[in-house]
């Protein structure tokens, strides 16, 4: 019998219950028991939902209060000393590692001041994991037994689950050594780590788990030989243990083919692969499956929101059944559903036709079940027919095609994507306009999004305040931010982005071809969720999107104010893209819309324009090779199409964060100034790599995800370290990223200290 499986379900709750609870706990509004209760309720709800949908294989341990990779660091005691010295509870340790912790001493608790661990993008998604950080003193041991507890919790509710664990090789490979242990290669720790995995697995078996899902997503990367060897070693080791649950080795987000040699013949019961992202791997995967192994066919997209095409999917599953027999095939989601919104039924404002194109996590449960029934010969004719109609109607929908947009994309040429002079020539022209001091200071764009801002935005959206009243409010916020920046002495100002709920959605809402959800939240990191807009059809900008706010900000100050835009790649990556045209086409359509905006800003007197591309690296195909170099070329081209229509003296900035960037790819964008997130990248090599970057850079000097306030001396120390290997004349001073998630008090102090540090260095470098 073919079984249906889900690799993971969103944990945030249909109404963001998890966010409210974790933030409530951090702010002291709810107790730890109340927090745990919310977690338990969410898990219960998810298991019941899946059971009622008829899913055969339901995951457990896919829940997390912050991040599933961080959970493992806690479980295996990969906790740097800077956290253990405070004797925090396990959950507070987890949160301190995830987001840093700074608190004053009270009668019962001592003062805590600790920075967060590094946070990195999860493969090519907009989910971020907390990077395991190993040191020479790392002592693996089990802290608690979260996977077992959650398995038992489900069992008590009458739900037999398949626990999910990130595998040992991926866990180590995605980690790093701390700065005092740079010669430590995390994979060397495999031998020490395997017995702990085995212990967890045997505890799961003892608790009644017959199967586990072990994710090794690194198997879709270009793995070095030592990592391939580590895969063989790890799973051979598990194969030798007695009484472990049956293992499904899961990969997703790409093809496993280049690593098939490492997987072939491993003593695992099943292999899960992603046939949505990489259908081309079918024949080779089938050929590599052992004669007793099961293939879990990932066919319902865990990364996008388009309705499944049952006919197409069933054909792929049937092909697998033909080769392997029904008992050795599982119909599954391509990856965890973590990356999709919870429930389409919560969408009240979508056009009915457009809504019919989509399927969110809850609907995907039904999709997995229907496909399973279909390939098992059960009668699902009505569902198939409705599905076929819906798929066909999308192709013909009036929302999709715009011939003027297609023609304009076809007309893009070299001239459109090249600035009229090289950087060396632009720089003196810009210096003349701005006359900036050494170590110019700036911020990345957003300022605290206060409750007041959210309340007024809601009022405006609901129509309880007029457009004029709202504009007045936004202008007063802009003025507050401008005055503050003038007061503390920043050099290049921003307007603070109070009018933007989200840097992609804000623009998407003003671009034709986009659809929006009211509740389509997806976890980005910790308690931060995003609501990606959906690219439904050809994209165009009917009118200026950001000029009014920038012009107002510039009108009330004599300092330069940066116009702030979100770049084409980030707009694309942080939306749910179309699956019926390639991503390059979508990026170019966005680039043209942004080009018009950049030109409008310049024409309106804005002299510095920042086009953010934090998602540049996310679009990167996971594997080296032709597809990747093609991506680099078109991604850079899209950025340059957006930014090359301006005069030499207009200064183009860009910003990147939370990924391992390669200076060469940033170079191809030809921005005059870039800022990158840097405060937690304590790696001298990383600075050295950027030393030869030709244009100007601001290396982020403080962590904006943490409420912690660095002192002036801390900034000075940080800058001194960087200056050892980085030229002062290219050095901009700025935070890691935008400040919208921070409170005003922290922002005020951190930025004040940062500016004081810049002034200190200006003195030092005088003549
Ligand atoms: N300008 C944006 C902001 O400051 C950039 C955010 C980002 O990089 N994610 O909020
Ligand atoms: Zn950023």
Image: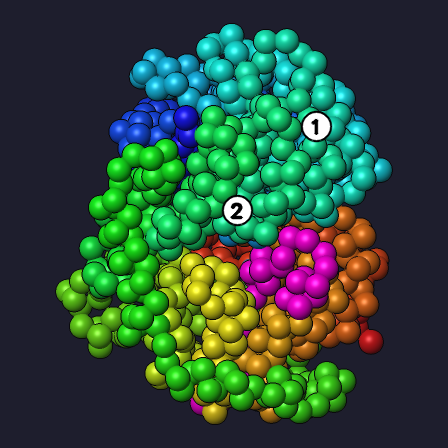
Q: Is residue 439 above or below residue 257?
A: below
Which secondary structure, mark 1? loop
**Residue 45 visible in rendering:** no
Q: Residue at x 58, y 60 (%)?
A: 619
Q: Which label was assigned to residue 275?
A: 2
Near mark 2 (Cα within 10 A), the count class, few <14, some 14-19 or many ≥20, is many
| Mark 2 vs 1, N-terminal side | 1
Q: Where residue 175 sits: x, y (%)?
A: 68, 38
Q: Where residue 313 sits: x, y (%)?
A: 42, 47
Quadrant in the picture for residue 70: top right
Q: Is 397 on the left-hand or right-hand side of 324?
A: left
Near mark 1 (Cα within 10 A), the count class, few <14, some 14-19 or many ≥20, is some
Q: Residue at x 53, y 89 (%)?
A: 411
Find disc 1 in the rendering and name its residue.
Answer: 265
Q: Is residue 123 above or below residue 392?
A: above
| Residues shaded magenta | 604-632
Q: Is 386 on the left-hand or right-hand side of 679?
A: left
Q: Is 232 on the left-hand or right-hand side of 345?
A: right
**Residue 354 visible in rendering:** yes
Q: Residue at x 64, y 53 (%)?
A: 622
Q: CA distance from mark 2 to mark 1?
A: 21 Å
Q: Is residue 50 above or below residue 194?
A: below
Question: Is the CB of mark 2 within 8 Å of ligand 1?
Answer: no
Question: Was residue 613 drawn as part of the magenta stretch in this picture?
Answer: yes
Q: Which label was assigned to residue 430?
A: none
Q: Where residue 523 sits: x, y (%)?
A: 43, 45
Q: Nearer the viewer, residue 698 or 584?
A: 584
Quadrant where the N terminus sits is top left
Question: Was residue 264 drawn as part of the magenta stretch in this picture?
Answer: no
């Amino acid at each position: 019998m073919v079984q249906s499986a889900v690799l993971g379900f969103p944990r945030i709750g249909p109404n963001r219950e998890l966010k409210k609870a974790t933030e409530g706990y951090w702010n002291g509004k709810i107790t730890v028991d109340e927090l745990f209760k919310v977690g338990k309720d969410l898990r219960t709800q998810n298991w019941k939902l899946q059971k009622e949908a008829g899913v055969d294989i339901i995951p457990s341990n896919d829940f997390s209060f912050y991040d599933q990779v961080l959970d493992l660091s806690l479980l295996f005691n990969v906790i740097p000393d800077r956290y253990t010295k405070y004797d925090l509870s396990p959950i507070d340790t987890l949160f301190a590692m995830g987001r840093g912790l700074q608190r004053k001493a009270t009668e019962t608790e001592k003062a805590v001041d600790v920075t967060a661990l590094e946070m990195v993008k999860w493969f090519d998604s907009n989910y971020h994991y907390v990077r395991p950080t190993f040191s020479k003193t790392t002592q693996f041991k089990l802290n608690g037994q979260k996977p077992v507890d959650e398995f038992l919790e489900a069992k008590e509710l009458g739900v037999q689950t398949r626990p999910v664990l990130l595998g040992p090789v991926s866990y180590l490979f995605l980690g790093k050594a701390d700065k005092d242990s740079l010669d430590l290669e995390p994979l060397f720790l495999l031998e020490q780590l395997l017995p702990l995995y085995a212990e967890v697995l045997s505890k799961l078996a003892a608790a009644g788990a017959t199967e586990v899902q072990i994710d090794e997503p690194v198997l879709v990367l270009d793995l070095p030989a030592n990592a391939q060897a580590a895969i063989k070693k790890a799973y051979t080791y598990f194969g030798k243990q007695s009484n472990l649950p049956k293992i499904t080795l899961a990969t997703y987000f790409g093809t496993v083919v280049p690593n098939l040699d490492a997987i072939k013949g491993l003593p695992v019961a099943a292999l899960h692969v992603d046939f949505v992202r990489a259908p081309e791997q079918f024949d080779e995967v089938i050929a590599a499956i052992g004669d007793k192994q099961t293939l879990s066919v990932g066919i319902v997209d865990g990364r996008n929101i388009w309705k499944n095409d049952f006919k197409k999917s069933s054909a792929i599953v049937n092909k697998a059944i033909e080769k392997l027999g029904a008992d050795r095939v599982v119909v599954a989601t391509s990856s965890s559903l973590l990356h999709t919104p919870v429930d389409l039924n919560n969408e009240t404002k979508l056009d009915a036709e457009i809504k019919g194109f989509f399927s969110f996590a809850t609907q995907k449960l039904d999709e997995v079940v229907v496909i399973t029934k279909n390939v098992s010969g059960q009668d699902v004719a009505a569902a198939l027919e409705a599905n076929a109609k819906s798929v066909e109607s999308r192709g013909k929908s009036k929302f999709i095609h715009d011939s003027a947009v297609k023609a304009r994309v076809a007309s893009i040429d070299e001239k459109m994507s090249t600035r009229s002079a090289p950087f060396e020539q632009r720089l003196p022209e810009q210096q003349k306009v701005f006359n900036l001091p050494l170590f110019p200071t700036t911020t990345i764009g957003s300022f605290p999004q206060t409750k007041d801002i959210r309340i007024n935005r809601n009022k405006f959206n609901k129509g309880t305040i007029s457009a004029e009243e709202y504009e007045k409010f936004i202008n007063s916020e802009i003025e507050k931010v401008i005055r503050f920046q003038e007061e503390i002495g920043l050099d290049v100002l921003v307007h603070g982005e109070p009018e933007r709920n989200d840097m992609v959605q804000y623009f998407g809402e003003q671009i034709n071809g986009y659809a929006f959800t009211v509740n389509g939240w997806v976890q980005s990191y910790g308690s931060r969720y995003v609501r990606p807009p959906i690219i439904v059809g050809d994209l165009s900008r009917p009118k200026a999107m950001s000029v009014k706010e920038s012009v107002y900000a510039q009108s009330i100050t004599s300092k330069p104010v940066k116009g702030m835009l979100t770049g084409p790649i980030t707009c694309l990556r942080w939306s749910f893209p179309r699956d019926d045209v390639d991503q390059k086409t979508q990026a170019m359509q966005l680039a043209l819309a942004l080009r018009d905006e950049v030109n409008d800003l310049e024409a309106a007197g804005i002299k510095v324009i920042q086009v953010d591309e934090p998602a540049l690296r996310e679009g990167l195909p996971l594997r080296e090779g032709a597809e990747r170099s093609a991506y680099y070329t078109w991604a850079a081209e899209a950025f340059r199409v957006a930014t090359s229509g301006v005069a030499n003296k207009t200064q183009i900035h860009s910003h990147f964060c939370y990924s391992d960037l390669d200076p060469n790819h940033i170079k191809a964008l030809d921005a005059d100034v870039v800022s990158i997130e840097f405060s937690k990248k304590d790696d001298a090599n990383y600075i050295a790599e950027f030393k030869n970057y030709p244009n100007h850079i601001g290396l982020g000097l403080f962590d904006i995800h943490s409420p912690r306030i660095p002192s002036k001396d801390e900034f000075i120390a940080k800058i001194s370290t960087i200056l050892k290997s980085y030229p002062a004349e290219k050095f901009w001073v700025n935070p890691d990223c935008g400040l919208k998630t921070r409170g005003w008090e922290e922002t005020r102090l951190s930025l004040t200290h940062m500016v004081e540090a810049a002034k200190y260095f200006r003195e030092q470098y005088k003549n």
